[in-house]
Image: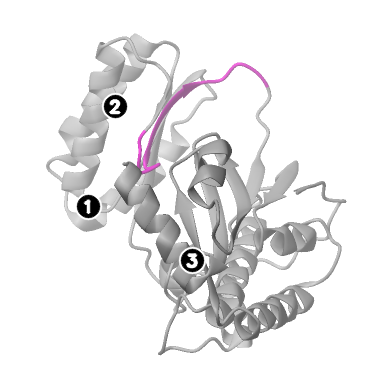
Amino acid sequence: AVRRRPPARRRPVEPAYAPQDCELLVLDAESPRHLRTRITEVADFVAGVSYGQVADLAATLQRELRGRPHRAAVVVSSPEDAERRLRHLAGLLENGESTHTTTDARGFLGKVTGPARIGFLFPGQGSGKGTGGGALRRRFAQAADVFEQAGLPSTGDMVATDVAQPRIATGSAAGLRVLDTLRLEAAVAVGHSLGELSALHWAGAFDERTLLEAARVRGGAMARHSASGTMASLQASPERAEELITGLDVVVAGYNGPEQTVVAGTVEAVRDVERRADEAG
């Protein structure tokens, strides 16, 4: 579901209070050639710095941005990681590739072609496993406040539906608080399944407390009424999935993509579908 957000009032900015466990290095240049040269210079430099100096480098690079069209960014966890990721981007530029996003989404090359627009994508069930809040909670008081209010369990099955849904909604709410603090605003938001609740909250349909309560109630209801069922994601087209479930107590529950279809049904029947899929290759 796509939501558009009305103008919102800012929350007061509170200071960050704990170190983070990664840094964002950003660079820009007038051309791919100049960007490659700059990336190589930074890679040479970062190879000789300490872990603590990576944060200083991130701040320096941010101050040096001039709004030039060709841009690069890497999310790094150490000097060695920074050097490796930067040299990878430099190699891509040398081979003529000027736009790229790494598979782990921690490296980026691009060119500005017009005014930037930001969109938020809120995840559904299946995202993450922990309830602690990670670096976001450690660094930002705003995020820590959301997790404290949510009162999530610290032990047990973190992917169980009645735990996962409030956990994921809490993470989304905490992320929104931090984005507001950083003055990062989106023009549009999209929610996948459970994430639609977070998108509605972002759009102003209801407040944060309602979001967390709705996720708790939704997760609890689904857990209580799905004890005898399960689902599976098949790397298959909808047509092929229909063939695989023929004669079984299973239905197509979601169309994730041209070659990814979700099926749901009784545990035994879904296991039969998985066996059929394995045998069919």
Say how many tags the image has.
3
Residue 148: x and y in percent read 57, 86
Q: Which residues are magenta?
A: 102-114
**Mark 3 vs mark 1: in front:** 3
Q: CA distance from mark 2 to mark 1?
A: 17 Å
Q: Amino acid at mark 1?
A: Ser
Q: Check residue 105 for magenta coloring.
A: yes
Q: Secondary structure at mark 1?
A: loop
Determine crowd level at label 3: few under 14, some 14-19, many 20+ residues with C-alpha closer than 10 A.
Answer: some
Quickly name the residue at label 2: 89
Quadrant in which residue 168 is drawn: bottom right
Q: Amino acid at mark 2?
A: Leu
Residue in the foreground of this view, choosing between 255 and 117:
255
Q: CA distance from mark 2 to mark 3?
A: 47 Å
Q: Are marks 3 and 1 in contact (CB under 8 Å)?
A: no
Quadrant in which residue 99 is drawn: top left
Residue 115 in sight from this viewpoint: yes
Residue 165 vs 183, above or below: the answer is below
Quickly name the residue at label 3: 269
Q: Amino acid at mark 3?
A: Ala
Query: Which mark sits nearer the N-terminus, 2 or 1?
Result: 1
Q: Main secondary structure of the magenta part?
A: loop
Q: Single out the residue that lies furthest toward the front.
A: 247
Residue in the foreground of this view, choosing between 106 and 232:
232
Q: Residue at x 52, y 52 (%)?
A: 245
Is the C terminus in the top left, top right, bottom left or bottom right quadrant?
A: top left
Residue 213 vs 28, above or below: the answer is below
Q: Secondary structure at mark 2?
A: helix
Quickly name the residue at label 1: 78
Q: Residue at x 58, y 57 (%)?
A: 123
